[in-house]
């Protein structure tokens, strides 16, 4: 009881000191700012790293998907004179002459191949027209070319009389184009500007669906294999659990390349699996397992399994075992008790694992490239193909951006359906 | 802090010094038995003679990698061994340096370089002749079964010959073979392939065996595929099969019908920083004696003065002894159609 009077003065004292002088406020603010600055300075390297390794490349990629300056730089004169063409019939002789002059120059500079590659993207087969014409015009006389350019061009290849050829030239001349994105969606624009399904071939939509389907199968396989294992690990005595955990983690720490090539050794025509199957007499002929969609799915499931097991395990470890016992003691049968009590409790780990496996497998590259053959190729392999082989960086950028948008959309859908706030990664 | 900076500085200095000191040339070729022969007769003698270190790397042919390096301005290769089927295209697209005439060294017998090479070997300004080689198909006698193939038609006949066929993953040669197998006379192949209808016909023929094809990228994969049963027959550069038969005693058999013969040349990647060193290497490697070593793997030298030095017992195995059965690969056709048929081929593969 004696304490009360002594407390009051302290409180009073605090009350008065709450009113700070202006100098003190400034000081306090400066202190806070300083702390913030220090904190900011500490994350600057990370921010810079993120900017240069993440934001900038993605921005460049998005930009490249629209930007194609090559043709405009290579044949500016032809494009300028072509601007007034109505798109019907053969363009004026002046346009043809300009093209002939440009082609001769390109042949001498050895850049006709670039022009050919660009135009070929708008009209399959056009590259041979451009290249053979350039080759023939290379040896013509300049004066003759200025005079009879149109005739010489038509003599070099009669395809130059075709308005479709010129429409392709005109279209390729646009510095900014939605063409790459349309191609990535198997669409194209008609000369009148309407969208239509790409006439030549439609492959990309099919590839995206195939990629998604494969990623889904891999996720399900990981789930089917990983869930019981994680459950067992979480409930086994710690000695067994630790030993088994090492078996889960050991492949996780092994080089990806080693694990993938191990599958080649296992699945090839005269590999371990086939020798076993034929030896036991299950099949008489070795099965074609390597270089198929099947081998890609198997190998990727193996590689991504730890990503499913680890979050599941950490969540299951935290579930109180008495919950299930309580449910059963109150009369629930094992399966309903599992579905109603245990499964919802593992949702955070299940979401995290499924999302991780799915997103990683959608963009996976190495394993399909090595064991996928032609059947098991996923969209990232085609992106790599356009980066490294066909040198069509615009299309690669468009396909990459589409993949990014696709994953963000899926994430958004997932967030709305399941909610991402309950994800537990470890 | 100071010590760290000093150590970092010293390390950087050492790094710069080491790159500046050793003169290194990157030479790229096809590896396998052919690469081994080149190493023995060209690379090692050159290093012994000049002290220049050579980084001898493998690639699987085609122009894509060279193109990517040139377009990105990141030149990693100096000298490449390139197939003439790709040479015209690479040269006309500005991916290779134009080689000065002085690089053609005179033959061992004193003949000036320009006369010593067979004309086709120096027909293109970007390449200097290396070898005459050819693309045949071969089968494994152990796995092929009782019916043996003997024509290109058999390669496309899945009823007569059951099993996987290994083919190189590119349109070149495959489209030519498809047309010949479909009945187009050898002399007319490129004429037909230049038309839309001809291209459709070639792809339709390839469609008939699409499920039985094992695709490979590198020539060195073929002996492996034939050996371990990955394929019962496979398209191959003749030297690889020759080497597997001669050196490893493999039960392989070559089919010369409709083989597509071509030349290989040395070329310098456009923008190489070691151009002069590269020319010096080519001048040496395309000399009489190094070229005379190529028949080790059944490839013909492109110099007349080297031919004299060739062991007569290999001559029947050289492509030059089978020219009447074959088709000459047309580099100019592929320069013009390589891009568009390449795109079509890839789309066909993905379908």
Image (tube, grey):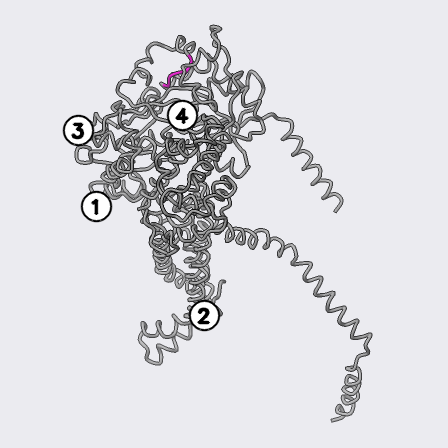
Q: Measured from the top left, where is residue A342 in percent x and y? A: 39, 71
Magenta stretch, main secondary structure, is: loop
SS of the residue at dot 1? loop
Q: Which residue position holds label 2?
A: A419
Chain label for disc 2:
A
> Which marked residue is nearer to the observer: mark 1 or mark 3?
3
Report the side of A27 relative to A377 (left or right).
right
Q: Are marks 1 and 3 on the same chain?
A: no
Chain label for disc 1:
A
Question: Please, is residue A363 above or below residue B229 in the view?
Answer: below
At horizontal 43% and vertical 65% (from top left) the residue drawn is A351
Report the side of A371 relative to B161 (left or right).
right
**How far apart are the alpha carbons under marks 4 and 2?**
60 Å
Q: Measured from the top left, where is residue A326 in percent x and y? A: 39, 78
Point out the stretch of residues depicted in magenta.
B299-303
Crowding near pointer 1: few (<14 within 10 Å), some, many (20+)?
A: few
| Residue B178 in sight here | yes
Q: Which residue position holds label 4?
A: B84
Q: Which residue position holds label 3?
A: B147
At horizontal 44% and vertical 22% (from top left) the residue drawn is B124
Chain label for disc 4:
B
Q: Which residue position holds label 1?
A: A282
Nearer to the camera, A351 or A200: A200
């Amino acid at each position: 009881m004696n304490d009360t009077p002594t407390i009051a003065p302290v409180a009073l004292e605090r009350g008065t000191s709450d009113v700070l002088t202006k100098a003190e406020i400034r000081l306090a603010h400066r202190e806070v700012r300083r702390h913030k600055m220090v904190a900011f300075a500490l994350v600057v390297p990370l921010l810079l790293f993120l900017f240069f390794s993440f934001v900038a490349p993605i921005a460049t990629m998005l930009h490249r998907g629209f930007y194609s300056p090559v043709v405009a730089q290579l044949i500016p004169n032809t494009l300028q004179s072509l601007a007034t063409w109505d798109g019907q019939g053969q363009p004026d002789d002046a346009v043809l002459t300009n093209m002939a002059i440009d082609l001769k120059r390109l042949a001498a500079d050895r850049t006709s191949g670039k022009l050919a590659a660009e135009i070929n993207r708008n009209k399959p087969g056009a590259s041979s027209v451009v290249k053979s014409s350039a080759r023939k015009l290379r040896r013509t006389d300049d004066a003759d070319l200025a005079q009879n350019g149109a005739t010489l061009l038509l003599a070099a290849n009669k395809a130059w009389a075709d308005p479709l050829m010129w429409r392709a030239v005109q279209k390729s001349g646009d510095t900014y184009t939605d063409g790459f994105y349309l191609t990535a969606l198997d669409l194209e624009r008609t000369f009148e500007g309407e969208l239509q399904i790409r006439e030549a071939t439609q492959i990309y939509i099919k590839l995206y669906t195939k990629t998604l389907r494969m990623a889904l199968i891999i996720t399900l396989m990981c789930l089917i294999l990983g869930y019981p294992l994680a459950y067992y690990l979480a409930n086994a005595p710690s000695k067994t659990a630790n030993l088994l955990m090492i078996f889960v983690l050991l492949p996780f720490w092994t080089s990806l390349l080693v694990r993938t090539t191990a599958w080649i050794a296992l699945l090839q025509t005269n590999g371990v699996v086939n020798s076993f199957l034929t030896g036991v007499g299950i099949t008489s002929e070795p099965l074609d397992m390597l270089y198929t969609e099947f081998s890609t799915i198997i190998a990727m499931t193996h590689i991504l399994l730890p990503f499913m097991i680890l979050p599941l395990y950490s969540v299951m470890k935290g579930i109180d075992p008495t919950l299930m016992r309580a449910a059963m003691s109150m009369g629930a049968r094992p399966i309903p008790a599992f579905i109603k009590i245990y499964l919802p409790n593992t949702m955070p780990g299940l979401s995290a694992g499924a999302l991780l496996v799915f997103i990683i497998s959608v963009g996976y590259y190495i394993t399909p490239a090595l064991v996928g053959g032609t059947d098991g190729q996923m969209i990232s392999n085609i992106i790599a193909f356009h980066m490294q082989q066909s040198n069509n960086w615009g299309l690669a950028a468009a396909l990459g951006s589409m993949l990014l948008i696709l994953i963000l959309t899926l994430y958004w859908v997932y967030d709305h359906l399941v909610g991402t706030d309950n994800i537990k990664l470890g | 802090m100071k010590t760290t900076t000093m150590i970092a500085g010293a390390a950087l200095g050492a790094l710069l010094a080491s790159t500046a000191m050793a003169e290194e040339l990157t030479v790229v070729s096809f590896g396998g038995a052919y690469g081994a022969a080149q190493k023995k007769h060209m690379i090692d003698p050159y290093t012994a003679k000049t002290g220049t270190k050579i980084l001898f790397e493998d690639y699987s042919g085609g122009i894509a990698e060279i193109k990517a390096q040139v377009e990105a301005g990141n030149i990693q290769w100096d000298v490449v061994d390139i197939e003439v089927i790709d040479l015209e295209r690479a040269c006309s697209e500005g991916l290779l340096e134009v080689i000065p005439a002085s690089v053609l060294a005179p033959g061992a017998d004193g003949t000036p370089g320009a006369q010593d090479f067979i004309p086709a070997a120096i027909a293109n300004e970007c390449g200097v002749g290396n070898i005459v080689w050819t693309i045949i198909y071969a089968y494994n006698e152990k796995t092929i079964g009782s019916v043996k193939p003997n024509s290109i038609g058999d390669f496309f006949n899945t009823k007569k010959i059951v099993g996987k066929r290994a083919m190189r993953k590119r349109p070149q040669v495959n489209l030519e073979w498809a047309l010949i197998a479909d009945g187009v006379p050898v002399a007319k192949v490129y004429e037909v392939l230049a038309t839309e209808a001809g291209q459709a016909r070639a792809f339709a023929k390839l469609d008939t065996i699409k499920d039985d094809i094992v695709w490979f990228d590198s020539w060195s994969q073929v002996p492996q595929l034939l050996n371990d049963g990955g394929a019962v027959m496979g398209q191959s550069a003749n030297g690889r099969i020759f080497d597997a038969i001669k050196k490893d005693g493999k039960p392989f058999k070559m089919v010369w019908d409709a083989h597509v013969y071509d030349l290989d040349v040395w070329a310098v990647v456009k923008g190489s920083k070691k151009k002069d060193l590269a020319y010096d290497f080519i001048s040496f490697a395309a000399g009489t004696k190094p070229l005379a070593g190529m028949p080790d793997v059944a490839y013909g030298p492109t110099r007349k003065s080297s031919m004299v030095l060739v062991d007569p017992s290999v001559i029947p195995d050289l492509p030059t002894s089978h020219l009447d059965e074959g088709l000459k690969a047309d580099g100019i056709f592929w320069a013009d159609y390589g891009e568009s048929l390449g795109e079509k081929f890839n789309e066909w593969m993905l379908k």
